[in-house]
Image (cartoon, helix red, strand yellow):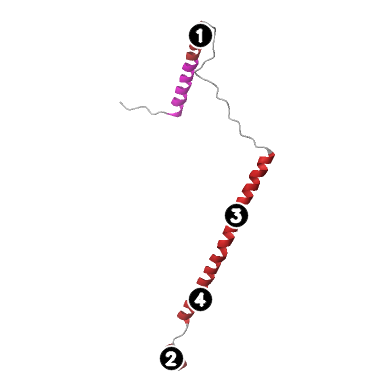
Amino acid sequence: MPTPKLTAEIITAAIEGFESQKRRIDGQIAELRAMLPGGPAESAATPELPTRRRKTFSAASRRKMAAALKKRWATKKAEAAKAQPAAAKNAAVKKVAAKKTTAKKTAPTPAAAETTDQ
């Protein structure tokens, strides 16, 4: 026997059915709780979770955080500036070396110079 394919309509209908069953069962639970001595009590099954509030910082602490961040970035930029001249110097040395090797390759050899003079 082939298994039926679950379509969006079938899944939606199943969800609605389960939610209605849940409401019916919650109603029955509330009725039973009301029968207990002491009257109806709140359902412990679905406690409301408090929403989490964001921590607020005072203006003074925000200024301190901003100053610390600026100091960190200044330090990082200073370190990068120190490293940059060394890298630029290495690049310049490599460029000069590359020019020398290409000049050697393109310079005519003495034997080639004699053949062109004839």
The amino acid on which the numbered mark 3 sits, given as a three-letter code, is Thr
> The N terminus lies in which quarter of the figure?
top left
Task: Please provide percent x and percent y for residue 95.
Answer: 52, 72
- Name the mark on residue 31: 1
Rate crowding at label 3 as few (under 14), some (14 to 19) or many (20 or more) other CA atoms within 10 Å.
Answer: few
Residues under labels 2 and 3: Cα distance? 63 Å
- Above or below, comparing residue 111 to residue 18 in the picture: below
On screen, residue 45 versus residue 56, left or right, reads left
Q: Secondary structure at mark 1?
A: helix
Residues under labels 3 and 4: Cα distance? 37 Å
Q: Is residue 32 magenta?
A: no
Give the residue at mark 3.
Answer: 75
Q: Which residues are magenta?
A: 7-23
The amino acid on which the numbered mark 4 sits, given as a three-letter code, is Lys
Give the residue at mark 2.
Answer: 115
Of mark 4 and mark 1, the one earlier in the sequence is 1
The amino acid on which the numbered mark 2 sits, given as a three-letter code, is Thr
Residue sitting at x 44%, y 22%:
14
Do labels 1 and 2 touch, CB within 8 Å?
A: no
On screen, residue 28 versus residue 56, left or right, reads left
The amino acid on which the numbered mark 1 sits, given as a three-letter code, is Glu
Residue sitting at x 43%, y 91%:
115
Of mark 2 and mark 4, the one earlier in the sequence is 4
Of mark 3 and mark 4, the one earlier in the sequence is 3
Of mark 3 and mark 1, the one earlier in the sequence is 1
Residues under labels 2 and 4: Cα distance? 27 Å
- Above or below, comparing residue 95 to residue 69 in the picture: below
Of residue 104 and residue 68, the one placed in the foreground of this image is 68
Rate crowding at label 4 as few (under 14), some (14 to 19) or many (20 or more) other CA atoms within 10 Å.
Answer: few
